[in-house]
Amino acid sequence: MNNMKALLLISFILSNVALAQHSNQNDRILNTYQLTDKLYDIDCYIFKPSKNVQITAKNKTRFLKQKLERDFSVNYKSHVLNFNVSLFPHSTEEAEYKVRFDSGDLFGGMIDTNFKKGFYLEPASNNSNINRYELNKLYCKINFAESNKTVINNSSNKLHINVHPHSNYDLFSETIKLTQNMHNNLKYKSMLLLEEEIDGKGNLVDLSDFLKTGLVPKLPILSYQTKIKIPMTTELIVSAAGHNRYIFKSDLETIEINYTGGNHNYCIWNNTRKLLTALIRSDSKSSLVINYHTKAIIAQRSGIIDGLSFKRKAMKGTRLLRKIFDNDTKTAAKYITNYFHYFATSFINRNGFDAHYRKLTISTFSNIPLVEKNITLKGNGERDINIILNYL
């Protein structure tokens, strides 16, 4: 009898510990959403440069007396020019912007109601600094309610990105075991991307109102739950459709990214685009190996672009990428090839990356089914970049 009482007591204690852990995890997730909704920053880059121009934010975005501002430096080879971007309220438009360079040059304009979160600089074309740094292609955007950029540096060469581990996607809990093991394995630096049901929620913020008060209004928050037991070592990041932002500050020889979660043909596809954009626009010389863990990734039937879809028969009773591949190996081979060709062709061409590399090699490998592809592109930059898309 005493043994039975002891067992009941232990069971009661364990159930209460589990309940407390679940509650703490939900509070942590909710707090991440709430903190992210209050974030804002100004971000700038050169759109389709013809040379490897680097722009670096020198500090955090500041709000002071109805003014939003941030300092940047623009670098080309040994030449560096500092500049400040500031925004002010305007009586008829969303805002007024000014870009002031340490050379004394000052440019300005309006952010209109149809393009209220960003602007292209409209400088004089005969200015020597403009020509050297291609600042006639400068684009700046105010990012509201988006997570800060995730910095990929020398702290770890093995990263685990768990994209939207949500029961609405993983209906049959097919990814849980392997994904949980990767979160628990400290050889990986893990981050978990929380789903955001409103893509571009920052557009709900009125820029004119914000500049008068400095306050981001209360925004709708998603109620998010996952069966993953999230370790405190895993970083939480809010990511609408996989559109969070990265910055590479690495001189490691190789960086390995390990993807789990879903959907591979939507959110992970988007996140891969953001990851590669950050690498290519940086001056990092690290090779990037992306491992798609097919036994821990789910997919949806219709892909975000042509060629990334599956037949209904192949997805009968499963959403796990590995099982989908096994169910229709011919379609799977075409899918992997189409994934590769998108990143090796239209993705590169559309973004005008060729100024950032001398040689860019993109490869893909899969044993399930067997696919091996690679392409080498020549640009007019100064560094070689190697990217591998690997299916495990």
Image (tube, rainbow, N blue to C red):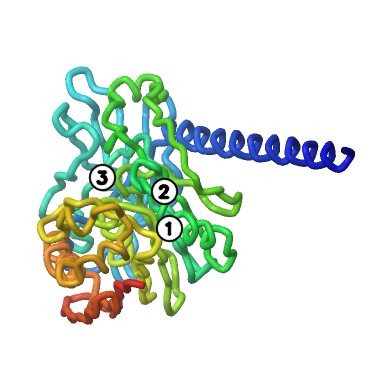
Q: Which residue is mark 1?
A: 161
Residue type, mark 2 in image: Pro
Q: Nearer the viewer, residue 250 or 293?
A: 293
Q: Nearer the viewer, mark 3 or mark 1?
A: 1
Determine contact: label 2, label 1, CB under 8 Å: no
- The x, y position of residue 336, in whole percent, is 21, 69
> Which quadrant would residue 15 be assigned to in this image?
top right
Secondary structure of the residue carrying tag 1 is strand
- In the image, residue 208 above or below residue 378: above
Camera sees residue 385: no
| Residue under the point 12% across and 64% down | 346
Q: Which residue is mark 3?
A: 140
Q: Which mark is residue 165?
A: 2
| Residue under the point 18% across and 23% down | 93
- The x, y position of residue 324, in whole percent, is 26, 62
- The x, y position of residue 239, in whole percent, is 36, 45
